[in-house]
Image: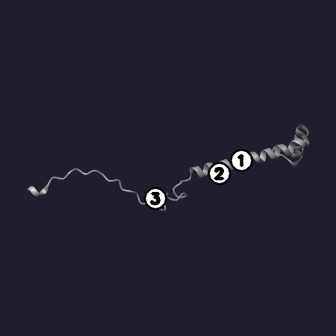
Amino acid sequence: MGAMSPWHWAIVALVVIILFGSKKLPDAARGLGRSLRIFKSEVKEMQNDDAPTTAAQPAPNPLPAAVEPTQQIPTQQAPQPDQRSA
């Protein structure tokens, strides 16, 4: 009463072919393959999301490559007291 013998597997395969028909089995296998590929890619994406992102991405440059000079806006200065009368 251990593992199934090759005869058991042949009977199971014959029953599956009779129940589902030979036309639907390739479509079912194709759909199963697509589902497994999608599942595998999603698992890989989840593992990449868990990885630290600091080593994978370079530090952003705080300044653009070419910085144009800015025009200084004149500010009003408070009148200074006359220093001659001291």
> In the rendered structure, which amino acid carries the disc numbered 2?
Lys
Q: Mark 2 or mark 3: name the one nearer the start of the chain.
A: 2
Residue positioned 30% across, 51% down in the render: 75
- For residue 19, above or below residue 64: above
On residue 44, which mark appears? 2
The answer to whether residue 36 is left or right of residue 15 is left
Q: Horizontally, is 25 left or right of 33 in the view?
A: right
The answer to whether residue 24 is seen in the rendering is yes
Marks 2,3: beta carbons within 8 A: no
Residue with the mark numbered 3: 63
Residue 2 visible at all = no
Camera-side residue: 26 or 77?
Answer: 77
Which quadrant of the rendered structure holds the C terminus? bottom left
Disc 3 residue type (three-letter): Leu
Q: Point out the residue furthest to the top here.
A: 19
Reading the image, the residue beneath label 1 is 38
